[in-house]
Image: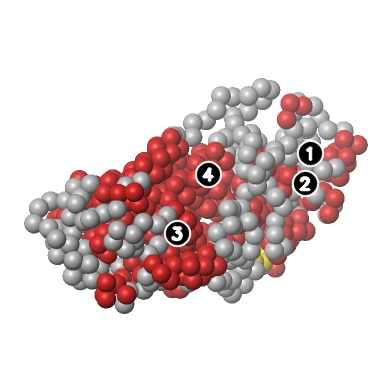
C-alpha cells in the first residue's frame, strides 16, 4: 500500500492549490526570453568591449559575447592600417597584370563571367544595389544575423578580401545596431550565399562608396553558414547540460542501481566521452537518499552514459569546426598578399575558389541533429519506463499521465524524421553551381533542439510525479534545485485528483528552453551548477 505524505509535500516548493500564482510568475519570467526565435535584444549580459587585431581573434567566445550579448566590438587602428596596405597592393597587382580575368572584379559575375566589364559597367556595378537577395519567408533570429555580419569581417581583417578600412569599419558599425536587417531562413540554397547576403548588405552600396572588388566581398563567401555553425554549437552547451540533469533525475527517480554508473566501468571504457557520461551521471546522483533497486534497470537507463558520450562527441566536433570556420578567411575571389604568400614560398595572387562553401560547418550541425534525435528517443524510453513501472508510478491516475507516452511518441517520431543528413543538392545551371544545404542543416538542428527539450519536459514531469507519489522522496543535493524548478512550473498531481496539465507543461517547456539559452549565453564563470538554476532577467 502506498502512503502519501501530504504534510511533507506541503513543505515542498509548491502545491497544486497555489498553481495560478506560481504559473503566472514562471510565465512572466520566460515571456521575453522565449519568443519563437528570440528575435532581438541580448540574451546574456554584455562584457568589456572587444578589440580585434587579427582574424584569429574571432573565437566562439567572442561570437557569443558580441552576437548573443551585444558586447561592443571594434577593429584595432593598426589592423585598419594593414587592411589598407593589403588593398593598395591588390590594386597595384591588378595594374601589373591586366591580362588576368578576375571574377566580379574586371569581368562580370554569374553567367556573364566570360565578359569583361567596361568602365561604365564597372561604375554602375559599384553604385547599384547588390540585387541578389531574392529569398523571402520567416526570418533568422537576430543573433544569427549579427553573427553573419561578424563572420563577414574575418577576411576583411586578414586583408584577404582586399577591401578598404572604410568598408571594414562600416560593416563593423552594423554590430552597434540593436536590431539587424531581417534575413529569411527559407529558400536559401544557392552557392556563394548570394541570396541571404544580398538582402543583408543590399543598402551598403547606397551608404558608402565601394571600390573595385568590394561588391563581391559583400555577397560571396560563407559567413551565413559560419554563423549557423557557431549558433548550433553554442546552443548545444545549455541543451546537452539540461539533458544531463533531467536524465540523471529520471535515473534517480527510477532507483537505478549505482553499478550502472560505477567508477569500475571506467577501467574498461576507453572513450573519454563515454567515461565523462559515467562521471556526470554519478556526480549528479551522488548523495541521493532514494533506495536503490537490487536488480538491473531497464535498458534505457543503463544506456544513458553511452548516449550522453555520443552527444559530447558531436558537441566537441562542432566546437572544433566552429573554431576553424569562424577564423578562416572566406572570400571569392580571394587575395593573398605578399606577406602571407611568402610563408608558403610563393608570390602574391588572387584567385576564384570555393571559399563560398563550408561543408564541415554543415556536417557539424548534422552531427548535433543526430545526437538530439537519439537523446529524444532516449527520453521517450524514460517516459515509457516510468509509465510501465507500477513501483515508479504507484496508484497513478491513468487519464492524466497515461496520455504523456502518446504525446512523447509524437515528439520522438518527429525527431527521427528530422535527423537525416543534409546531402548536397544536384548542380544547377550555367556555372554548374553547387547549392549548399547550410540553412537546411541549421533549420533541422534548430527544430530538434525544441523537440528534445519537449521530451525532456515530459521526462521531468514524470520523474517529479513519481518522486511525489512514493511519499515525496528526496533526490540528490545536486538535483534538488532542478526538482524544485520543475515543480514551480508543473506541480505534482495529488492522489485521485485530475487536472489538465498541458498548459503547465508548456510553461515548463518554455522555461527549460529559455534557461538552456541563458546558460549557453552566460560567461562560463557566471553559469549556475545546473541549467534549471539559471536566473532569467
Badge 4: few (under 14), some or many (20 or more) residues near its Cα, within 10 Å?
Answer: many
Q: Reading the chain from its start, which is encountered first: label 4 or label 1?
A: 1
Q: Which mark is residue 523?
A: none
Q: Can residue 534 be seen in this view?
A: no
Q: Name the residue under label 1.
A: 131
Q: Residue at x 83, y 54 (%)?
A: 208
Q: Reading the chain from its start, which is encountered first: label 3 or label 2?
A: 2
Residue 42 in the image, given as x and y percentages of width and height: 60, 65
Cα separation, mark 3 vs mark 4, equals: 29 Å
Question: In the rendered view, would you say 47 is above or below 192?
Answer: below
Q: Mark 2 points at which residue?
A: 202
Foreground of the two, 495 or 144:
495
Q: Reading the chain from its start, which is encountered first: label 2 or label 4?
A: 2
Q: Residue furthest left?
A: 294
- The quarter of the displayed image where residue 257 is located: bottom left
Determine contact: label 1, label 2, CB under 8 Å. Answer: yes
Badge 2: few (under 14), some or many (20 or more) residues near its Cα, within 10 Å?
Answer: many
Foreground of the two, 17 or 270:
17
Give SS at disc 1: loop
- Which quadrant would the C terminus be assigned to in this image? bottom right
- Which quadrant would the N terminus be assigned to in this image? bottom left
Q: Mark 4 points at which residue?
A: 442
Residue 166 in the image, given as x and y percentages of width and height: 77, 58
Q: Which mark is residue 504?
A: 3
Give SS at disc 2: loop
Q: Residue at x 68, y 22 (%)?
A: 430
Left/right of residue 180 with respect to residue 401 in the rendered view: right
Foreground of the two, 318 or 383:
383
Foreground of the two, 527 or 173:
527
Q: Which residue is drawn at 49% across and 35% down?
A: 422
Amino acid at each position: 500500500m502506498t502512503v502519501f505524505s501530504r504534510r511533507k509535500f506541503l513543505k515542498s516548493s509548491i502545491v497544486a492549490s497555489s498553481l495560478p500564482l506560481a504559473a503566472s510568475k514562471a510565465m512572466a519570467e520566460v515571456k521575453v526570453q522565449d519568443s519563437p526565435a528570440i528575435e532581438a535584444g541580448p540574451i546574456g549580459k554584455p562584457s568589456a568591449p572587444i578589440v580585434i587585431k587579427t582574424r584569429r581573434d574571432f573565437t566562439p567566445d567572442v561570437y557569443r559575447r558580441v552576437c548573443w550579448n551585444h558586447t561592443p566590438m571594434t577593429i584595432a587602428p593598426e589592423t585598419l592600417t594593414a587592411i589598407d596596405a593589403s588593398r593598395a597592393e591588390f590594386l597595384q597587382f591588378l595594374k601589373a597584370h591586366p591580362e588576368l580575368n578576375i571574377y566580379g572584379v574586371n569581368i562580370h559575375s554569374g553567367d556573364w563571367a566570360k565578359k569583361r566589364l567596361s568602365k561604365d559597367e564597372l561604375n554602375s556595378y559599384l553604385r547599384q544595389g547588390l540585387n541578389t537577395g531574392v529569398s523571402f519567408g520567416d526570418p533568422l533570429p537576430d543573433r544569427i544575423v549579427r553573427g553573419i555580419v561578424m563572420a563577414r569581417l574575418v577576411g576583411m581583417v586578414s586583408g584577404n578580401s582586399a577591401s578598404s578600412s572604410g568598408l571594414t569599419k562600416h560593416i563593423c558599425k552594423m554590430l552597434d545596431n540593436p536590431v539587424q536587417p531581417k534575413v529569411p531562413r527559407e529558400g536559401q540554397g544557392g552557392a556563394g550565399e548570394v541570396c541571404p547576403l544580398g538582402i543583408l548588405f543590399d543598402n551598403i552600396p547606397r551608404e558608402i562608396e565601394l571600390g573595385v572588388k568590394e561588391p563581391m566581398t559583400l555577397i560571396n563567401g560563407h559567413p551565413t553558414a559560419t554563423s549557423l555553425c557557431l549558433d548550433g554549437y553554442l546552443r548545444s552547451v545549455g541543451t546537452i547540460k539540461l539533458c544531463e540533469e533531467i536524465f540523471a533525475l529520471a535515473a534517480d527517480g527510477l532507483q537505478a542501481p549505482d553499478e550502472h554508473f560505477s567508477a569500475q566501468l571506467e577501467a574498461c571504457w576507453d572513450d573519454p566521452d563515454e567515461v565523462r557520461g559515467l562521471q556526470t551521471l554519478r556526480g549528479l546522483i551522488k548523495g541521493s537518499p532514494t533506495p536503490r533497486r537490487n536488480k538491473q534497470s531497464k535498458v534505457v537507463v543503463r544506456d544513458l552514459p553511452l548516449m550522453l558520450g555520443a552527444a559530447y562527441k558531436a558537441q566537441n566536433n562542432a566546437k572544433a569546426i566552429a573554431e576553424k570556420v569562424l577564423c578562416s578567411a572566406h572570400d571569392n575571389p580571394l587575395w593573398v598578399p605578399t606577406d602571407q604568400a611568402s610563408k608558403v614560398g610563393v608570390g602574391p595572387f588572387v584567385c576564384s575558389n570555393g571559399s563560398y562553401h563550408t561543408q564541415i560547418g554543415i556536417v557539424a550541425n548534422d552531427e548535433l541533429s543526430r545526437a538530439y534525435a537519439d537523446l529524444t528517443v532516449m527520453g521517450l524510453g524514460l517516459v515509457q519506463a516510468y509509465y510501465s513501472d507500477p513501483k515508479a508510478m504507484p496508484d497513478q491516475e491513468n487519464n492524466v499521465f497515461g496520455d504523456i507516452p502518446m504525446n512523447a511518441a509524437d515528439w520522438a517520431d518527429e525527431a527521427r524524421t528530422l535527423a537525416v543528413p543534409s546531402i548536397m543538392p544536384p548542380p544547377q545551371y550555367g556555372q554548374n553551381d553547387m547549392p549548399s544545404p547550410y540553412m537546411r542543416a541549421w533549420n533541422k538542428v534548430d527544430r530538434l533542439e525544441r523537440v528534445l527539450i519537449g521530451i525532456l519536459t515530459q521526462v521531468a514531469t514524470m520523474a517529479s510525479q513519481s518522486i511525489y507519489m512514493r511519499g515525496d522522496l528526496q533526490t540528490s543535493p545536486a538535483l534538488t534545485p532542478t526538482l524544485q524548478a520543475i515543480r514551480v512550473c508543473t506541480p505534482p498531481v495529488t492522489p485521485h485528483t485530475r487536472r489538465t496539465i498541458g498548459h503547465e507543461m508548456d510553461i515548463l517547456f518554455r522555461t527549460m528552453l529559455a534557461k538552456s539559452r541563458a546558460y549557453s549565453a552566460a560567461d562560463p564563470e557566471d553559469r549556475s551548477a545546473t541549467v534549471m538554476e539559471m536566473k532569467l532577467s
